Amino acid sequence: MSENLIAVIIGIVEGLTEFLPISSTGHMILVGSLLGFEGEKASVFEVFIQLGAILSVLILYRDKFLAMFKPRTINIWGNGLTAMHVMVGIVPVMGIGYLLHKPIKSYLFSPYTVIIGLVLGAVLMLVAEKASKRPVTRDVDHMTIKQAFFVGLFQILSLWPGFSRSGSTIAGGLFLGMSRKAAADFSFIIAVPLMVVACVYDLLKIWNKLSTDDFTILAIGFIVAFITAYISIIWFLRFLNNSTLASFAYYRFIIAGISYYYFFLR
């Protein structure tokens, strides 16, 4: 299989899974293993195309970001969603991620650990759905700083590949009395600074592993990830208007079972 086709496939996987509660990292590890696309080049590629997914969020939520970061001013303590909400939402996972970055990369990026994360993340979402009651926060502009911080604590779970960043944060939002839509909006918004920092940090360490010939697959993956992420976010937000996270949890159980059979039993 050509590298360009692999770039398209993994770009689609990244775009479709980055913001759905099914774990993009877990899916890319599994798909990369299936396609034989592994090693240093694959690591750079998988990090870089996440920037395409991030761009889709910036465009879809541009009004929220412009309200927080107006020219020459930053909305820290004002009305609605503020920069403070974002900061307290990302500090916990950034701190833990920085401290544990090396062991996470060394020990948790394998099909076996992804399968565990898929199962545990599915259980978390089902428990959150069962525990959630009538939401007290229906719109992201009405969430509190306290809610933002505790959602950020749930985000730490996503450092385990397979758990899913959006799955962890949306489940956390449900436990804290947020509606699915409000929790999803906040999950997507705090993904932008978090993923930019993580991507730049990883890319600076491994960028020298690339050659000029690799920029074609990077461009293909970036564009494909952007388009598919844009579409998947719009679909997911509409889906949450009338549905729960249960179907995604059951999907995760199925993928975990199939993956376990493929990698360990056949």
Image (spheres, helix red, strand yellow):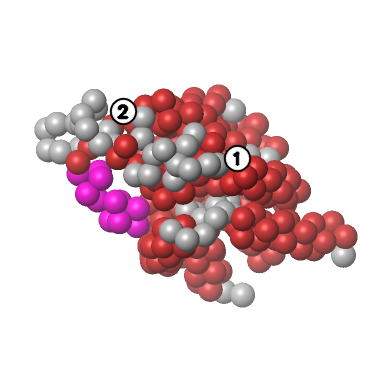
Q: Picture coordinates of residue 65 (x, y %)? A: 25, 43
The image quadrant that residue 226 belongs to is bottom left
Q: Main secondary structure of the magenta part?
A: helix
Q: Residue at x 67, y 37 (%)?
A: 106
How many angstroms separate mark 2 from mark 1 (CA)? 28 Å
Q: Picture coordinates of residue 41 (x, y %)? A: 55, 54
Q: Residue furthest left?
A: 72
| Disc marking residue 58 | none
**Quadrant of the drawing holding the N terminus:** bottom right
Magenta highlight on residue 59: yes
**Quadrant of the drawing holding the C terminus:** bottom right
Q: Is residue 208 visible?
A: no
Which callout, 2 or 1, points to the residue nearer the camera? 1
Q: Picture coordinates of residue 116 (x, y %)? A: 73, 45
Q: Picture coordinates of residue 190 (x, y %)? A: 39, 40
Q: Which residue is mark 2?
A: 84
Front residue of 22 and 160: 22
Q: Residues within 10 Å of mark 1 (few under 14, many from 20)?
A: few
Front residue of 8 and 82: 82
Q: Residue at x 65, y 43 (%)?
A: 127
Magenta highlight on residue 64: yes
Query: Disc 2, disc 1: CB below 8 Å?
Result: no
Q: Amino acid at mark 1?
A: Ala
Give SS at disc 2: helix
Q: Which residues are magenta?
A: 55-66
Q: Amino acid at mark 2?
A: Met
Q: Residue at x 38, y 44 (%)?
A: 138
Q: Residue at x 47, y 37 (%)?
A: 177
The image quadrant that residue 218 belongs to is bottom left
Q: Which residue is mark 1?
A: 131
Is 133 situated left or right of 90 in this image? right
